[in-house]
Image (cartoon, coloured by chain):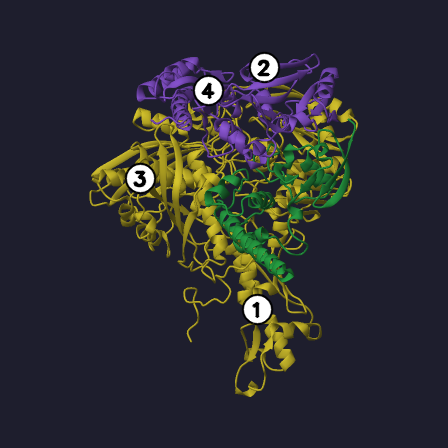
Chain colours: A purple, B green, C yellow
Amino acid sequence: MRYEAPTSSKEAAKLLAGTKGKAVVLAGGTDLLVRMKMGHVEPDLIVDIKRIEATQAIKKTASGFKIGAGVPGATMGRNSALKKAWPGVVEAAELIGSDQIQGRCTIAGNLCNASPAADSVPAMVAAGAKAAVVGPNGRRTVAVEKIPTGPGKTSLKKGEMIESISLPKKAPRSGDAYLRFIPRTEMDIAVVSAGVNLTLDNKGVVKMARVALGAIAPTVVLVEDAAKAIVGSKLDEEALSALAAACEAACKPIDDMRGTIEFRTEVAGVLGRRAAKLAYERAGGKS
Amino acid sequence: MSGVQVSTTINGDVEEFVCHPGETLLDVLRNRLGLIGAKEGCGTGDCGACSVTVDGELVCSCLVLGAEVEGRKVTTVEGLADGNKLHPLQEQFLDNAALQCGICTPGFLVAAKALLDRNPDPTEEEIRYALAGNLCRCTGYDKIVRAVDAAAKDLRAEAKKAAKKKAAKKAKKA
Amino acid sequence: MAEQTYTDQEFKVIGTRPRRPDGVDKVTGRARYGADAFAPGQLVARVLRSPHAHATIKKIDTSKAEKMKGVKAVITSADLPDLTEGNRGNFDILENCMARGRALYHGHAVAAVAAIDEPTARKALKAIKVEYKVLPHVTDVDAAMADDAPIVQPHVQQDGKPSNIANVSQFGHGDVDGGFAEADVVIEKSYKTEQTHQGYIEPHACLASVGPDGQGELWVTTQGHFTFRTVCAQLLGMDIAKLKVTSSEIGGGFGGKTHVWMEPLALALSRKANRPVKLVMGRDEVFMGSGPTCSTSMDVKIGAKKDGTITAAEATLRYQDGPYPGPWGMLGAMTSFACYDLPNVKTVAYDVLVNRPKVAAYRAPSAPMAAFGVESTMDLVAEAIGMDPVDFRIQNAAKEGTRASYGPTYGPIGIGPTLDAVKNHPHMQAKLGPNQGRGMACGFWFNFGGQTCTDLNIGTDGTVNLTVGTVDVGGARASMSLIAAEELGISYDKVKCNIGDTASLGHNDTTEGSRGTFSSGMATIFAARAAVDVLKQRAALMWEIDVDDIEWKDGAAHAQGVAHSNLAPLTLEEIAKKSPQTGGPIAGHNEVVADGAGVSFASHICDVEVDPETGSTRVLRYTVVQDAGKAIHPAYVEGQFQGAAAQGIGWALNEEYVYGEDGRLQNPSFLDYRIPVCSDLPFIDTEILEIPNPNHPYGIRGVGETSIVPPLAAISNAVSNAVGVRLDHIPMSPPRVLKAIKDGNGA
């Protein structure tokens, strides 16, 4: 086993690509070290990307925000501009684990861990976030929903790593929200979750919406029918019921120790509805 | 498996050690440096008994590699007291009987200090959520929350006193 | 002046709240727990565990592991004494530590290694090849009682046939059928509770060292180092006196550290390697390979007249013990109706074997489940006869002279006073909002005394070393120091309380049954009184007067009578200073079987809010009222009440062992075994009642356990009141509550 802490993404990609055995990226480590502890992964090379400058900052750009892949949740929570623009995404990131986990966990890591229950992912998907991927063959930009392909599996190729996550510029009269259900008040993995991002016209009618659900299928799901159910509405009861029904219809969950199929399906509708209402309020809509 | 050589600062002292690439900071602290205050309750970041700060950020030392702290500043429960003067949190934990078995106490103290460093006047709810990553099975958290609240009051009083003193000094100078 | 009795004593330091003597060590990180010991040349041990719930072990090949560089010892059951022909109890204990021919649950240890470091030990485990033949398994208590269930222990039989029913226990008196015939209302209902773990934050850990001369030392986190010494010596064929066991600081036990789990393995590895061996369980191993409490299934039936008189009560309890028979069903049967004065009562309990970990004690073991069934049914009966649930309980509460449902006749007890306190508590007046509900429930625990041995030594400066053999699970050193200070008449800070190792004291029973303060407190009082006798003799020598003319008062010898009026009192310190000249060290010693542990009762009130769309329950207010007999250090008594209530809340709402179809434990982690976190709980209000225990010099009753008994039922009653349907399955996790709401009846 080797540990390397390169100072550029290019160098990191080279290390990752050039290793014969299992090479892993270490960002916050809050998933990786657990998997190592449990013996689920025994890497030959650990590439710590936190000494790479580009992974370390949150930058406000002309097109929105760029969040470095090594930026922990706690730092996102302290960035007031980011919080103001994308409260749902920031809240989702801040829901990952305890304050201790917040000191380390990253949204890029949360994405690459590829858990269907990852807290930040539905919010990122709803927000239309994109990942900047660096690999041995250069850079590419990928919509975040294209990264996880199934539990624990990603579309990243050998040698590729995420350098940063970009969020678009916040549109006027838009708002986002993320809600999850956990049995305790903290420290749990989402049993079901919902992220909603919507934009209103100047009359308060929803003109664009994205609804994403977590923990109800092998990957986070962008539910287009749920978005359609509220576009053109002022989020009246009828629209909300249609949204809830669409959320329930999109569920293909499993029965496990965290929740039953029946429970997940029903609560997906409840959370979709509640998150939509919150996003609507944040967009300035009055229900 | 080759060792990684690390130079870091722990509780204000420069420490150098060699560790396995996959060895956690918790194991380094306990097994290589003799700092047994951080405890392993789970090894998976779920109990907070191994809490330390790295460059001021609260973390579970079981989820940090020893190799990662090269050039960083680590603070553990052993660094909380100022010489033989206990930190107000330590004093209040004792006065409020906020520990029973005590295994979670170091983690709670480190986490509570991290909270009060950035929020000197937390509400009960803020205390409870800030400490949600620290499991305690003995106390039901009641006396812990009260101790943190009392220590926050002490620290605010201390800060006020220090500010007054500073102002008086400044006035004198002027 | 009449002789003081336990009811009218005036205390000077008892009842105050000083800092604990071990406090500074515990807030600075210096205190040493199980995993905090290091020995020169120590090895790291790891245990290989069965991936199957039930399997025959056909072959274990350790040859590859043994040849690995850095591996110093590998053991399987073949390296341990074969107790097949011996005592069955010892056989079971050792077989649970290391499977012999068959794996009886997921996580059952099958081999262990000691190596120079952790990575090597892990690699060695991977190199051990075990050949299993998987057998059918059973993990559910009701399924295990079915006729065609897989048999867990072929030697366990009922009516001459192999059976999973290990014990049947029955208690009660009167004519139950006749009593039900007299009732206006009879309610009968079935309940289930899932398996929970004590959840102490410190995993099992020890450091063992055994030499070729057969002498050994064991540093271990335990509630009973003397018991561990006896058990380990017996299992491994060592001389008891040659094994010194030191109890480390203990990071929580709650009953789970009363049994040996892997300590004999560490000793055996050390013996084989001839080096110290450190063995620390991972959290997953704690869940899989130590001892949680039973899951249960039960039927409860209570009949009452319209005026509120209970005419008969009956319970059938089925407790799951894991693969080894225990007393758990029996304890459930004994405790279930202990709060009430019943003319006709019958309880029958079955101890049932399944392919899960061996069950261990968990704080008032077996009582919370039975109380859940009984106290839920009590609410249903009260509702059916239109009576307030508190008044209904007050009317039927046991009192002095009541024949307990499990046999004995009660002396002065606290159930009535706790109920009166509940009725008058401001909590009962707090307003409830929408989706909120209030519940209350009662609980009982026996408490225990047992063998105790204590030493008290007075130094020449007048300070006191008190050595006790019960462990300090949560402030006991403070309580013992208070007691010694009270008895000697000196200040608290003059006493230093130590927990003695097995080489320094006679046998002490395990610290269980809330016995620490009761029994070591009693032995401390007697040891201090013995020391006072010596102090008086020394004063007599110093004064050259008759010892009968000396009275001990306020920490000093006082010469009595006009003849001695010229003699100023001699303080303890003055007498101690002269002790080298008056006969040498001054000490008091006591060994006692501390009989007469007073039974303890608690009544709890709880308010909850339930989200009707998700089934999520939030505890809003919680109040504990419990009888302590006499609170020595009230802050730590409150701590016991609060901690017990919090464990009960976790059990009631979210904690459970989840098994898959494959018989494997699905959630052996603090992530998915959900104990309450800080933000889950409100402040837990406490009210300490003091109804003295006549069998203790200070009136002490144990306080540690009782308050885990009521919460399951108190919360269930509150949730049921909030959602309007009766919950009958613990934990009341959101999926269960949501389903109950949707179905309109019990989950």
Q: Position of residue C34 (x, y in %)?
A: 64, 43
Q: Are marks 4 and 1 on the same chain?
A: no
Q: Position of residue A91 (x, y in %)?
A: 50, 30
Q: CA distance from mark 4 to mark 3?
A: 32 Å
Q: Are marks 2 and 1 on the same chain?
A: no
Q: Count neighbours of disc 3 (C-alpha within 10 A) and say few if under 14, some if 14 to 19, many if 20 or more.
A: few
Q: CA distance from mark 2 to mark 1?
A: 75 Å
Q: Which residue is mark 1?
A: C490
Kind of residue indicated by mark 3 = Gly
Residue at the front extreme of this rendering: B174
Nearer-the-camera pick, B64 or C339? B64
Nearer-the-camera pick, A263 or A15? A15
Residue shown at 52% from the left, 38% from the top: B132
Q: Which residue is mark 3?
A: C433
Q: Which residue is mark 2?
A: A142
Callout in the foreground (2, 1): 2
**Quick check: C401 left or right of A139?**
left
Q: Which residue is mark 4?
A: A213
Residue C345: name its quadrant: top left
**N-terminal-most mark, 4 or 2:** 2
Say which element carries label 4.
Answer: strand
